[in-house]
Image (spheres, rainbow, N blue to C red):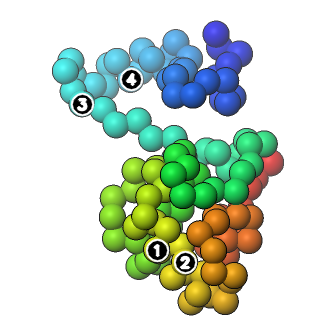
Amino acid sequence: NPGSIGTMASNGCIRLYNHNIKELFDMIDYDTSVIISGGPNWRFSPYNRVVTPNCKGADVYHVQRILNALGYYDHPADGIYGYSLELAVKKYRADNNLPITSDIDEEFFKSIGCEKFE
């Protein structure tokens, strides 16, 4: 269903245009392990939420990568908001004079330089 590509139409399905599938097929050998990451594309969608512990998604992954680069999070980014990320969020908030909470909200996103696009 090409009309579903680029939308929040499912919870984990991978949707590609046929020409992208053919391109990928030619690039990767049979039996190659592949990791698919949503990356920061959520920034271009109307989807918006306050991220709290136990949340999962591309937004969590992106925060983990930024906090890792800033020296607050020293674990691999996996898109899962666990206890280590919660500690990093609280430390970042304390160091940057933000209310100390485990929420990753709009104020937090802006503080780390991550804003939504249209």
Which residue lies under the disc numbered 3?
Answer: 33
Q: Nearer the viewer, mark 3 or mark 1?
A: 1
Asked if residue 112 lies left or right of residue 85, the reply is right
Q: Quadrant of residue 65?
A: bottom left
Asked if residue 107 lies left or right of residue 65, the reply is right
Q: Secondary structure at mark 3?
A: loop
Whole-percent x and y of residue 51? 63, 56
Which residue lies under the disc numbered 4?
Answer: 24
Tag 2 or tag 3, which sits nearer the N-term? Answer: 3
**CA separation in Å, label 1 and label 2:** 5 Å
Tell me the kind of residue under disc 1.
Leu
Q: Secondary structure at mark 1?
A: helix
Q: In the image, is residue 14 above or below residue 74?
A: above
Tell me the kind of residue under disc 4.
Leu
- 102 and 111: which is toward the camera: 102
| Residue found at x 45% / y 17% | 21
Q: Quadrant of the N terminus?
A: top right
**CA separation in Å, label 4 and label 1:** 38 Å
Q: Secondary structure at mark 2?
A: helix
Q: Nearer the viewer, mark 4 or mark 3?
A: 3
**CA separation in Å, label 3 and label 1:** 32 Å
Q: Secondary structure at mark 4?
A: helix
